[in-house]
Image (tube, rainbow, N blue to C red):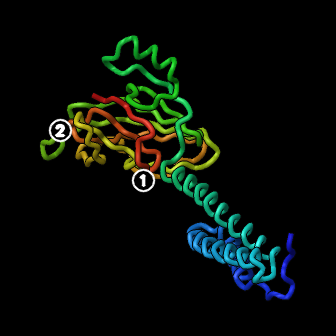
Amino acid sequence: MAGENRDASRSVAAIVGLVLGILAVVLSWMPIINNFAFVLGGIGLVFAVVGMVGVVRGKKAGKALAIAALVVNIASLAVVLGTQSMYSSALDDAANGPDVTATDAAQAAGDDADRGDAADTDAVSTQDLGVGSSVTFEDGVTLTLDSVEPGLTNYDGSPVIGIHVTYVNNGDAEFDYNSYNWKGRDAQGAATDPVYYSEAVDELSYGTLAAGGTVSGSVYFEGDSVSALYYASIIADSPAASWTIA
């Protein structure tokens, strides 16, 4: 097998590819910037391939350099893909808030015994819960929809329905609560934010609940709401739990 041409000049393409690959590896761990690292790694890989072709054909020297450039650039691309997946997952978790880990489900009004049997086999079902049901999140916070106030009338004559909820922070860290984590959903599936109710009593606002603390309050929705939806984050794309209220 023919050896490397020692009289040939060292492959510039392999050198450039290696330099770009090293830069790509360094930048690949940084959020957002690693998008640029992916481009660098791709360009570096092209240079590395060109350098390897030149070395294999005997036109250039530096086989080890070309191999190193190939390895480094491929590694940089793999690291970018891996870190972006990791960061994307972390962002999704932050946006959607903590997951529900347990429920203490009361049977919804009008449900038959079959629903109760299903609750036994689906202990972490978090949707269409009955009034009085609780959900516990992975951060240790337990949320209960205590009661419903139907048939209320607002100052302008519009119908309103209210719910009373309780948060218990059994976790180790403070917990931020907000009435705008709640939405009311009507029978057609349209979800709307809480409404102002002129006769509100003990209305839930927003604040920070210390570890071991408890806070309760009322949230009011348009009168045609049939479900109360709770979002673990105000930017979450789907409710963490829902209760049937009408």
Where does residue 161 sit, x and y in percent of width and height? 25, 36
> Does 14 sit left or right of 160 as displayed?
right
Where does residue 204 sit, x and y in percent of width and height? 38, 45
Given residues 51 and 30, the one toward you in this image is 51
Which amino acid, by three-letter code, is at mark 2? Answer: Pro
Which element type, helix, strand or loop, lies under badge 1? loop
Q: Quadrant of residue 24?
A: bottom right
Q: Is residue 213 above or below residue 29?
A: above
Which element type, helix, strand or loop, lies under badge 2? strand
- Crowd tier of the residue under label 2, counting other residues whose Cα lies within 10 Å: few below 14, some 14–19, many 20 or above: some
Where does residue 186 sit, x and y in percent of width and height? 24, 37
Quadrant housing the C terminus: top left
Q: Which mark is residue 151?
A: none
Quadrant housing the N terminus: bottom right
Per the image, the residue denoted by label 1 is: 235
Residue at the image position 72 percent from the left and 69 percent from the top: 70
Which amino acid, by three-letter code, is at mark 1? Answer: Ile
Tell me which numbered mark, 1 or 2, is placed earlier along the sequence. 2
Furthest residue in direction front, as rendered = 1
Residue at the image position 36 percent from the left and 21 percent from the top: 108
Given residues 97 and 22, the one toward you in this image is 22
Where does residue 220 sit, x and y in percent of width and height? 29, 41
> Does 1 sit left or right of 189 as displayed?
right
Which of the two marks, 1 or 2, is nearer to us in this view? 1
Q: Quadrant of residue 13?
A: bottom right
Q: Is residue 104 above or below residue 90?
A: above
Furthest residue in direction top, as rendered = 113
Residue at the image position 58 percent from the left and 40 percent from the top: 138
> Does 34 sit left or right of 7 as displayed?
left
Per the image, the residue denoted by label 2 is: 159
Residue at the image position 51 percent from the left and 17 percent from the top: 120
Q: Is residue 68 above or below residue 13?
A: above
